[in-house]
DNA sequence: CTGCATCCCCACGGATACTG
DNA sequence: CAGTATCCGTGGGGATGCAG
């Protein structure tokens, strides 16, 4: 997930490409973004929509997405409290390039499957 | 990086989307694919082009990409042996969706940077 | 030159329990 | 309900040395 480097060889953490793909590449971000594409969700709604994520990782990933301005968090001071998460306008714009990757996957998975079987058979 | 699940909640490892994004999401695949976009490379050329990858991870990532049919490996029986890696036609087709993500990154990194500073300042 | 084998570390993330 | 705190296992991946 490293896409840029400084002349001295150190990582350039300011590289926008690296920033993006690091987020796409982590375990839960894309699934959360895809879930939010269907509309706003509350914390517990995520836990139901994504059964195998832990509260710990859900909190952490949502906070990262919020920090990057892709997700907005709204607290309603009811009792018990409820919190709603939704895509920001910026967050919504990543759905299209993400979808393009998903389309590539759907177009290519058959060929990949064949390639894997051939490779493993040759092994 | 999990984008599909079976009805029982278990991971669907056959999900093409998960397959793709797992590869995109690993630490070196995208950088190797981007390097190959410029043309075929030999093993040692990768090590020079990507200074901070280890031989171990280069070997492993190239083999994964080869197994998926995205990269072709050609051995020239010279002495000492040389090996050339190049994108397959299938591998070349992922460059476009990948580029769309890179473009999104370049368009959005300023906004993300602002969002992060605002978030951290509010924290 | 192109790898493979081995050792080892640590951070990612799961499980569980607790709080406002 | 919506988190926080803590503990801990696993495996990704770096470093190094060896082999064909």
Image (cartoon, coloured by chain):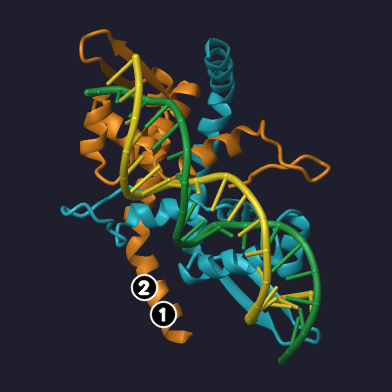
Chain colours: A orange, B cyan, C yellow, D green
Percent x, y of residue B20: 41, 54
Give residue A110's quadrant in the image: bottom left
Q: Residues within 10 Å of mark 2 (few under 14, many from 20)?
A: some
**Are discs 1 and 2 less than 8 Å apart at CB?**
yes
Q: Nearer the viewer, residue C20 or D17?
A: C20
In the rendered image, which residue does mark 1 sit on?
A118
Q: Is residue A73 visible?
A: yes
Residue B89 at x, y percent in the picture: 49, 63
Residue A26 position in % (x across, y down) = 47, 43
Q: Quadrant of residue A109?
A: bottom left
Q: Viewed as shown, does residue A81 lie left or right of B123?
A: left
Q: Residue at x 80, y 84 (%)?
A: B80
Q: Identify the chain of the residue marked 1, using the numbered disc in the image.
A: A
Where on the picture, by quarter, is residue B87? bottom right
Residue at 77% across, 39% down = A6
Residue A114: numbered disc: 2
Could one spot residue B1 in this view of the protein?
no
Spot the residue most to the right. Answer: A8
State whether residue A55 is above or below residue B20: above
């Amino acid at each position: 997930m490293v896409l840029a480097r400084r002349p001295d060889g150190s990582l350039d953490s300011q590289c926008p490409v690296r920033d993006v793909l690091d987020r796409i590449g982590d375990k839960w971000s894309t699934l959360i973004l895809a879930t939010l594409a269907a509309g706003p969700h509350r914390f517990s709604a995520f836990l139901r929509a994504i059964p195998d994520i832990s509260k710990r990782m859900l909190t952490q990933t949502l906070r990262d997405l919020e920090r990057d301005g892709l997700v907005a968090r709204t607290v309603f001071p009811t009792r018990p409290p409820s919190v709603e998460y939704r895509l920001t306008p910026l967050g919504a714009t990543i759905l299209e390039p993400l979808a393009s990757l998903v389309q590539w996957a759907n177009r290519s998975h058959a060929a990949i499957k064949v390639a894997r079987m051939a490779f493993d058979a040759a092994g």
